[in-house]
Amino acid sequence: MSHVVEVQDVCKSFGRFSLKDVNFGVNRGFITGLIGPNGAGKSTIIKMMMDMVRPDKGSIQLLGGHPSEEPSIKDRVGYVSDENIYYEHLTIGRMKTILAPFYKHWDEEAFRKYLEMFELSPKAKIKNLSKGMKMKFSLAVALSHHADLLIMDEPTAGLDPVFRRELLDLLSEQILDDSKSILFSTHITTDLDKIADYIVFLNAGQVVFSDSKEGVLDRYVMIKGGRELLDRDVRKLFVGVRESSVGFEALCKDRSAAKQVFQEDALLETPTLEDIMYFTSKGGKSA
Ligand SMILES: Nc1ncnc2c1ncn2[C@@H]1O[C@H](COP(=O)(O)OP(=O)(O)OP(=O)(O)O)[C@@H](O)[C@H]1O
């Protein structure tokens, strides 16, 4: 399968934080979710893709090249930042007039349609927009130049549940055209339960896994049972465990091993992406 983003052996340090040998690919024609808790390094990786941060080591290719060497690549990428990257004192309409010439395939009609759909007035000043409205403006720009690749850093942050759902539907529609691909970072994993095809999980600067969502949910398992089942050998199976006075809840990344060990003694369930992120990043805590 061809990759529209290729991250190879990327390292980057900021004081005590470091991304360590990060490797993953984003498949053409699919939605890939980049998940991880706060501070995992998601924005840093995305900024490196957009050539806003330089890796200390390793390389990142977008659409077969690198934006710093081939500026035309940026034209084919729709980028949504988690920060406001627009001039605050301008109106939406004026800001658009500045941005549009940067894109060869700018589609004025599509932009107008998105402004209407997102209930944004071209006369509104950017500084007067709420966080969610700024995000909507950013999305309208990213969706209005026929980009082959959408790279979105926390695009659902600040959005109300109704629009959030509409946006997820809109993104699913985008990839009906097989040539389009989406990379979507979030720490709210429920956004991805429905729409993501692939998941890259970043924790403390390292890739925990990069796989199809089905593959991940098949492999991992949640185990629920009584505390009498816990001993040192059993604990070795766990990625993380949460214990209470009555029982335990644990995540294991080998479903068949868990089945063999617990048989009928414990309840084995498919975890959510949130369970996987929680137990991996925290290791679980006794309650
Ligand atoms: N320019 C910078 N200078 C110093 N430290 C930085 C810089 N950019 C990021 N960091 C640090 O790198 C770490 C990773 O940050 P990053 O924003 O990539 O995480 P994230 O996964 O996007 O988190 P969040 O979900 O909270 O947005 C953090 O500890 C952050 O403080």
Image: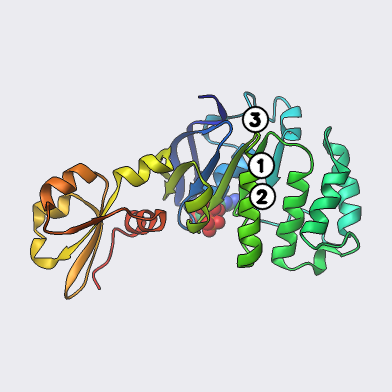
Looking at the rendered structure, the kind of residue marked 2 is Leu
Q: Earlier in the sequence, mark 3 or mark 2?
A: 2
Q: How many marks?
A: 3
Q: Earlier in the sequence, mark 3 or mark 1?
A: 1
Q: Is residue 99 above or below residue 68?
A: below
In the rendered image, which residue does mark 3 sit on? 179
Looking at the rendered structure, the kind of residue marked 1 is Gln
User: Residue 174 has which mark?
Assistant: 1
Disc 2 and disc 1 in contact, CB within 8 angstroms: yes
Inter-mark Cα distance, 2 to 1: 6 Å
Q: Position of residue 184 (x, y in %)?
A: 57, 47
In the rendered image, which residue does mark 2 sit on? 170
Q: Is residue 243 above or below residue 155?
A: below
Residue 105, quarter of the rendered image: top right
Is residue 205 visible from the viewing direction of this image?
no
Which element carries disc 3, helix, strand or loop?
loop
